[in-house]
Image (spheres, coloured by chain):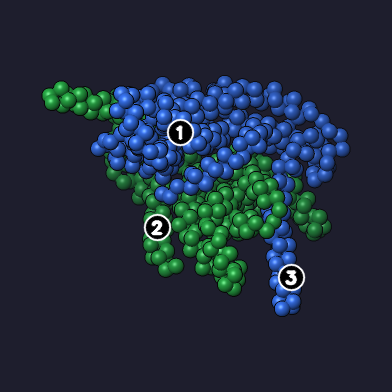
Amino acid sequence: MIEKHATMKSSLREQRTAYWMLVLPGFLIYFLVLAFPTVVSILLSVSNFKGGKLFGAKVPWKLVGFYKYKVLFHDPYFYMALKNNMWIVLISVFGQIPLGFILAYILYRGIVKAADFFQSMIFLPCVISTVVIGILWSAFFSPRGAYPELVKMFKPDYVYQGSVNHPMAPVLFVILWMYTGNYLIIFIANLQKIDSSIIEAAKIDGASEMQALRYIILPALSGVIVTSAILAISGSLKSFDLIYVMTAGGPAHRTSVLSVYMYDKAFINAPDYPMANAISTVMVAISFLLIGLTKLAENKFGGRE
Amino acid sequence: MANIKDKRSVTSRIGLFVAYLVLLAFTVLALYPLIWLVLNSFKTTTEFQLNRLGFPKKWTTLNYTYAWVKGNFPTMIMNSVIYTGITTVVTLIFSMMASFAFAKIANKATPFLHGSFVIGLLLTLQSIMVPLFLLANWAHLYNTRLGVLIPYIGIAMPMGIYLCTEYIKSIPTALVESARIDGATYFKIFGAIIVPMAAPVATTVAIMTVTGTWNEFMLINILTSKESLKSLPVGVQKFAGALSSDFGKQFASLVIGLIPMLVFYAVFHKEITKGVSAGAVKG
């Protein structure tokens, strides 16, 4: 009896040791790289840190309060960047997701041949490095690129003005071009989970294509649509590479987004680390806010179907 | 009756026509810029200015030989292979290990630890950009390979943990328990049961980590300044960005940047798309 108790105890100890040995390597790296810096970022945003050593400096930095946030909320460039971020959110949620769904639906219905080919080709832009895509499209849209020539084929007297009036338009187009395939894949994977015999039965009962879509397919996909919206929102707020490469926020901050504006504050000219971190903290807050709103909308409208 | 049937087949034929039209339009839209890029990378910049849309009249590979050498691309590609390879292997091992513990070994810490990984899926890289740069400087990891690899592994962990835990949970616990009764240690069980059975999810995680790491640009751009440590995307950006009007050479460097991922996609396109739909995790 005592012996059995002892082996059980040692087995429990072994179990605990094994657990921590399995979990810790991954968790430590994760903590070091994501969790800890996130906290540091929030602290820096309310500090007077001016660069130099982060820890162990002769004159250590102090927390001085929300001063930078006050400055930020009165900064017109901040609102310019935020507005551009919102454009990206809109084009992602109301552009990429519906287009992705339409394409997925066409492929899912199984009426076209070579569906795999179409799917692989439309998804192709998603695997290419954003840097390559950004430079490629900059060249394509440049006054000496392909776009003016293409328009001239249809309108011979066309004079290319550049995108001075709508500097965000090319960026938004490229974002749509790049990521629509992503939602195509997400939707098609989830459409394939729907039991097709339900749709066939509805069709035999006389339901039209539109009715099947409205009453069977869309309700079944409502969860995926919300997930996609959340992905699109958080992805849109994160977007950095493409704009950094295509315009670097120019001309005159007109295509800047929050992440590029933050990068400017931290790494261009005299670094203002507290301000950069205030911007990134606001970005995280907005992201959580929008995701929260999406979930709220899901709870309110999702149950109706 | 026949009339109705005719009507139906007409509408369905129109539907089919529209379906093909939409798909074809999007396929052309996806491919045209890439084809345009490849064609023009074989023109001299002078020819490109005169003939921006057509095929090259005289095909030249000079752009490629120039870009390959001046852009230091062999080094960049080697670096990308090193970063991607090590990140993928380490992420895979660590996330399988931790996921096995989360899924099959009871511990009170699991909800907290696993939960903090899942929150990591929502954290933005921007919010850690400045702290990582400062921490790397402080720890003397700025401009080192390790200083790139540690963040890359940390960033890839949340998705790895999320997918592997879900998958390993579906492996019958009875298998683990009976192996325990037979006296196997947890590490033995991990190697002999979990790893072989979780191979499908391991593939998905590996593919996702490879694409994510290979294309990563923002962090490596701020964590390194040495030419010898840069990855392919940074190399392309630096080389092509400096050549804003010498389109021929710029295009050649873009094609060089494009090819590795295209080959990877051609080989693994099934697995890549599987990863995308598996990664559509609700926040």
Work out whether residue A161 can be spotted. no
Q: Amino acid at mark 2?
A: Lys
Question: Where does label 3 land, which residue?
Answer: B10
From the image, state whether disc 3 or disc 1 is nearer to you.
Answer: 1
Q: Quadrant of the N terminus of chain B?
A: bottom right
Q: Is residue A157 visible?
A: yes
Residue at disc 2, secondary structure: helix
Q: Secondary structure at mark 3?
A: helix
Question: What's the distance in space between the residues labelled 2 and 3, CA to CA?
Answer: 42 Å
Q: Chain of mark 1?
A: B
For marks 2 and 1, give the one nearer the viewer.
Answer: 1
The structure residue drawn at horizontal position 33% and vertical position 24%, both measured from the top left corner, is: B184
Residue A156 place in picture, x, y as percent: 82, 57
Judging by the rendered image, the residue that carries numbered circle 1 is: B197
Q: Looking at the image, which residue sits at the far left? A: A2
| Up/down of A170 relative to A14, above or below | below
> Quick one: B234 or B185, which is closer to the camera?
B185
Q: Position of residue A112 (x, y in %)?
A: 69, 56
Chain where mark 3 sits: B
The reply to whether discs 2 and 1 touch (Cβ–Cβ < 8 Å) is: no
Inter-mark Cα distance, 3 to 1 = 51 Å
Residue for point 33% across, 42% down = B115
Position in image of residue A195 (x %, y %): 53, 58
Q: Are marks 2 and 1 on the same chain?
A: no
The image position of residue A247, as x and y in percent, is 60, 44
Q: Amino acid at mark 1?
A: Met
Q: Is residue B62 above or below residue B12?
A: above
Which of the 4 image quadrants contains residue A248? Answer: top right
Instruction: Name the residue that disc number 2 marks.
Output: A295
Q: Give the chain of mark 2.
A: A
* Chain coloured blue in the rendered structure: B
